[in-house]
Amino acid sequence: MSTILKGIAASSGIAIGKAYLLVQPDFSFEKIAISDAEGEINRLHSALNAAKSDLELICQQTIKFVGEEEAAIFNSHLLVLNNPEFMTAITEKISREKVNAENALTDTTNHFVSIFEQLDNENMKERARDIKDVSKRILSHLLGVRIPNPGLVAEEVIIVAEDLTPSDTAQLNKKFVKGFTTNNGGPTSHSITTAKSIELPAVVGTIEASVAIKQGDLIIVDGVNGDVHINPTPEIVQRYKEAQKDYEKKKTE
């Protein structure tokens, strides 16, 4: 049955293809009372260094495949990792409250994010997204889970996700990834800036794309009008193929 989701047209263009659901790993953990605060802080620093290596590699890949301007996003992420106020708050919480690094990291992240999100400034709200992205990467190393790498996709697909971080978007290979749609996000986010720079059609803010769309569904991402068609009829597909040709022709002109 053909279904239409309404979202925000965030990056122009039309993509038709098979859905690839980008599923995040399980980041759940328990709050644990610890006796060796120094050992826990060492765990945190090991995770920080691993996250830093990840970001430096992603930054290099972004410069190579997208451009230096878009790679500047990751300088913001590295600044978060090197921010003494943020990192000191985490280590002090471990020492003071004798809790595991996962708990200290998450509580501190939530505190800083709430401060930035309350500010009436879009740039500051983007800083909150940067902190969340960096924190998730550190947490993945603490928990020993792998964050899915969309850069490993080796077939023509349209990415479907709850949200895409700037690092997710920077790793998209335009040869295979033809567009994306997410539940969350807005037209001014870092990930959308990257999508526009590599000319990937995108619709964000659909609320339920990652639930309504199943792995392998045929979908159409209309980055012009903000629509996402799930399992469209042959007639709709044909109409969009013609619209796609018209769009590419106008873009070339």
Image (cartoon, rainbow, N blue to C red):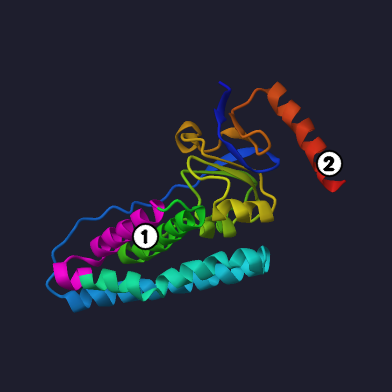
- Place of residue 232 in the rendered image (x, y in percent of width and height, measured from the top left): 63, 26
- Place of residue 59 in the rendered image (x, y in percent of width and height, measured from the top left): 56, 69
Q: Main secondary structure of the magenta part?
A: helix
- Label 1 crowding class (10 Å Cα cut-off): few <14, some 14-19, many 20+? some
Q: Which residue is mark 2?
A: 250
Identify the mark at residue 58; answer none if there is no mark: none
- Comparing 26 with 98, the one in front is 98
- Label 2 crowding class (10 Å Cα cut-off): few <14, some 14-19, many 20+? few
- Comparing 155 with 184, the one in front is 184
Say left or right for 101 vs 121: left
Image quadrant in which you'd find residue 239:
top right
Magenta stretch contains residue 48? no
Q: Which residue is mark 1?
A: 145
Q: Quadrant of the N terminus?
A: top right
Is residue 84 positioned above or below 17 on the image? below
Amino acid type of the residue that numbered disc 1 sits on in the rendered structure: Val
Is residue 211 positioned above or below 165 on the image? above
- Comparing 215 with 202, the one in front is 202
> For the point 69% across and 43% down, which residue is it?
12
Amino acid type of the residue that numbered disc 2 sits on in the rendered structure: Lys
Q: Bounds of the magenta span?
A: 93-118
Is residue 80 positioned above or below 118 on the image? below
Image quadrant in which you'd find residue 246:
top right
Asked if one can make out residue 30 in the rendered structure from this viewpoint, the answer is: yes
How far apart in space, not on screen, are marks 1 and 2 (Cα)? 45 Å
Asked if one can make out residue 171 in the rendered structure from this viewpoint, the answer is: no
